[in-house]
Image: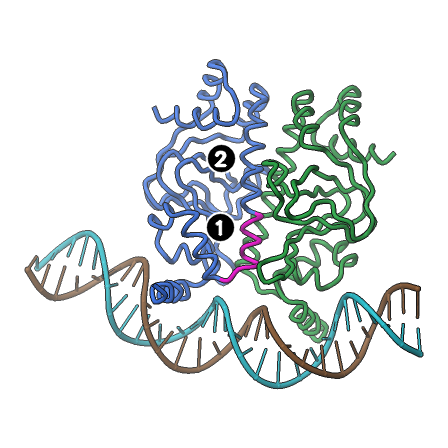
Chain colours: A blue, B green, C cyan, D brown
Amino acid sequence: MEIELILKYISRHIDLSDKEKSILVEHVKVRDYLKGQFIVQQGDVCKYESYVISGCAKTFFIDQEGNEHVVMFAIENWWTADLGSFITQQPADYNVQCLEKTKVAQFSHTSLEQLYAQIPKLERFFRIIIQNAFVASQKRIVRNLSLTAKERYLIFREQYPDIEQRVPQYLIASYLGITKQFLSKIRAELIMEN
Amino acid sequence: MEIELILKYISRHIDLSDKEKSILVEHVKVRDYLKGQFIVQQGDVCKYESYVISGCAKTFFIDQEGNEHVVMFAIENWWTADLGSFITQQPADYNVQCLEKTKVAQFSHTSLEQLYAQIPKLERFFRIIIQNAFVASQKRIVRNLSLTAKERYLIFREQYPDIEQRVPQYLIASYLGITKQFLSKIRAELIMEN
DNA sequence: CGTCTATTTGAATGTACTCAAAAGCGGTGG
DNA sequence: CCACCGCTTTTGAGTACATTCAAATAGACG
C-alpha cells in the first residue's frame, strides 16, 4: 500500500515500533491531485506538509510585475509545503501546483503537533529532514551568487536529471533565475560545444 | 553569567527543568575569539555549533577564481557553523571568521548527540531553530531571484540594521552578490534620491 | 603626517533581459 | 492524412543592469 512508502522513508532515519506506525497512519491523509491542481495557494493558510508519493509539483509565486518565479520542484520522496505559512498558520507566500497527476501523504498542523507529543522521535526525524533541506538551500544561495547561469544549469541537470525531463524548460529557467529565452540560448551554446 | 543567556534563549522555545539546565551547561563550552580568528576553516571538519553571545562573525568561502563570497553574518543570538560539515563530519565548505572580539557557546557533535538522548526536547528546539533558518533561507533565494541589487540592499538594511553598521561595506556587497563598486554606486543613487 | 585599508568615481565591457517574431510540436477535427 | 490551434522553444536586435579595471578620495590608526 502506498502508505507503506512513507513509513519506510521515515524508518530510514528513526526506528518506529508497530504501535507508533499505526498512530502515524491514523494521522496521515493520502490525497490525489490532478495535473494543474493546487496543493497550496498564495494567500491561504498552508494546511499540510505533503510528502510526494508519486507525481511532481512546483512551488512558485507571482511578483509585483506579474512574473512567475519557481522556488522549488518536488518529486517522489520530497516534501512540499509553504513551511513558513504552515509553521505560523499565516497566509502563504507561495503556491504549490501539481505538474502531473500527483499522490501525496499529508500531515495537518494539529496532527503533527499531536504526533510530536505521542512520538517524540518524530521531532528528530523532522529536524534531520529540515536540516538537510537547509543545507541544500544554503548551497543553492552560494551557487546563485558565485556561478554563471550556464554553470548553474549544468549543475541542475546533473543534480536533478529526473526533474529536467519531466518539467517544461521555461519552468527550469525560472527556477534558475533566468528567462526562458536565455536558457534556450545556453542550450544552443552547449550543443555547439559538442 | 553569560551561560544564562543561552539557557534563557532556549527557554523561549521549550521548558527546561533545573536538572536539564545543569545537564546542558555541562555540555556547553564558552569560548572567546579575537577579531580575525576562525571558528571554522574550509577543509577542516566543523566541530561545533556555535551560539553567538556577543560579537560578530561572517561565513564565507573562496571560489575557483579566488573571490570571497559571504554566505551569512551571525551576531548576538544567532547560531553559526558549517552545518553540512557538522552533520556529516566531513570537511567544511565554508569558513567562519570573527569580525569582532566574539564570545560563543559551543556544542560539539558528540555533546549534542548525548544531549539529544538525555533531553529529547532539544530535538524540538533545534527543529524549530532550523525550520526558521530554512524559511529565511528560502526567502533569500526568492529575493535574489526576483529583485534588483538595489531592492535587495534596501531590504537588507531594514532587516539587519545592526549588521550594516558593524560590518564593512564590501562584505555586505559580497553578501548581496554584487561588487563593492556597484554597492557604492547604489548608495550614491539612494543619496541623490533624497 | 604617512601608511594602509575602505570607499567612491569613471569608462569600457559583458552578461542577461526585453520585445518581437519565427519555428517546432503535439493534439484534434475535418 | 493534413490543416489548424495552442503551447513551448528558438532566434535576433536593441537595451539595461552589473562587472572589470584603473585611478582618485576618504577614513582609521599608529
Quarter of the picture containing the N terminus of chain A is top left
Q: Which residues are magenta?
A: A138-148
Q: Quadrant of residue D27?
A: bottom right
> Residue lying furthest front in this view?
B43
Residue A27 locus on image (x, y percent): 47, 23
Answer yes or no: are tags 1 and 2 on the same subunit: yes
Q: Residue at x 42, y 40 (%)?
A: A39
**For the stretch drawn in magenta, what is the main secondary structure?**
helix
Task: Choose the circle earlier in sequence order: 1 or 2.
Answer: 2
Residue B28 colored in magenta in the image: no
Dots 1 and 2: beta carbons under 8 Å?
Answer: no
Q: Could you tell me the amino acid type at mark 1?
A: Val
Q: Which mark is residue A71?
A: 1
State how far apart marks 1 and 2 are (Cα): 16 Å
Looking at this view, is B108 or A114 the one in front?
B108
> As displayed, is residue A110 above or below residue B42?
above
Q: Secondary structure at mark 1?
A: strand
Residue B56 locus on image (x, y percent): 77, 50
Q: Which chain is home to disc 2?
A: A
Q: Which mark is residue A49?
A: 2
Residue B160 locus on image (x, y percent): 72, 54
Is A48 situated left or right of C26 in this image?
right
> Residue lying furthest top in this view?
A19
> As displayed, is residue A98 above or below residue A191?
above
Q: Could you tell me the amino acid type at mark 2?
A: Glu
Residue B65 locus on image (x, y percent): 59, 63
